[in-house]
Image (tube, helix red, strand yellow):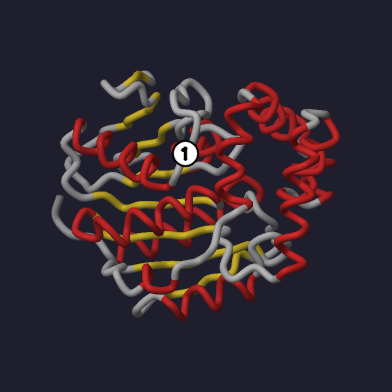
Amino acid sequence: MPSTFDKYKTFYYLKKENETIPIVFIHGVGLTKEMWSPQINFFKDQNILTYDLIGHGKTPLEKTQLNFEDFIKQLLNLIDELELKKIHLVGFSLGSLIARHFASEHSDRLSSLVLHGSIYKRSIEQKRVVENRFELMKLDKPASKKSALRRWFTEEFIKNNKEVYDKIYSMLEDNDIKNLLKVYKLFVNYEDEDQMFGKINTNTLVTTGQYDVGSTTEMAKNLTKQIKDAEYREIKNGKHLCNIECAENFNKTIELFIDRNYDEA
């Protein structure tokens, strides 16, 4: 099935192979649903749903201000329209924050939850770094995008995978900077709400890259402790975009977790 729009103007792709519970992937800020190509190719016999977040790709942003409820409503409207009663939800970076909020309000719709590259309790210095990055983004210069890619991939991967580098760079380039700034501001100002984690009542896996500097292994381990019975896995040799650079490890980690948490659709 080709990509299309729902009635709320969310641009999405649904691969429906059978009656299994679909895996829904939420991308990060500045990217699009296309970042999940390695997962679509890997989970060949699995139903897959990917979509462009509000203000990203082909999904418009029609509000002057955004909050996480807008993103929760976007996902809920989409799966309701597609009549998906249950989903496996995988969120990356900003997408993991959306997934956390969604899970705290709609755990009954989830068979499992995977949070990859998710921030938790940033230090004052870590917050300052993100604020400085936000100021650099406002200039909309190539240096900001190149800096992002160096945070997301190891130097070795960048050197040996120019085609992938160019594809991710193009996503950053093609997204509307005004929209990105509105969305990124949510990330910059984000404060963890610990009471939210007590409302997450689904099987949860927290993962992060071994060398991720923005969502560190320490953050991931501490986040895991906040969610009842959550599991933690470190993606060896990865930075932020492990689903691409360490696709084999990332995919198998998720596959094993989902297989253990399968129930009837």
**Residue found at x 26% / y 69%:** 201
Q: Position of residue 28 (x, y in %)?
A: 55, 43
What is the x, y in percent for residue 84?
19, 41
> Image height check: is 200 above or below 64?
below
Q: Residue at x 42, y 59 (%)?
A: 114
Could you tell me how many numbered marks the image carries? 1
Residue 59 visible (yes or no): no
What residue sits 52% from the left and 51% below the top? 92
Q: Relative to 225, does residue 247 appear above or below in the rendering? A: above
Locate residue 179, reporting x and y percent: 58, 29
**Image quarter of residue 236:** bottom right
Q: Which of the 4 image quadrants contains residue 42?
A: top left
Q: Front-most of 48 and 76?
A: 76
Residue that label 1 marks: 66
Which quadrant: the N terminus?
top left
Query: Residue at left 37%, top 26%?
Result: 10
Above or below, 8 relative to 100: above
29 to the left or right of 135? left
Say whether residue 241 is left or right of residue 58.
Answer: right
Q: In this view, does 265 lie to the left or right of 191?
A: left
Q: What residue type is labelled 1?
A: Leu
Label 1: few (<14), some (14–19) or many (≥20) C-alpha neighbours in 10 Å: some
Give residue 232's position: percent from left, percent from top. 49, 73
Q: Classify 156 as above or below 146.
A: below
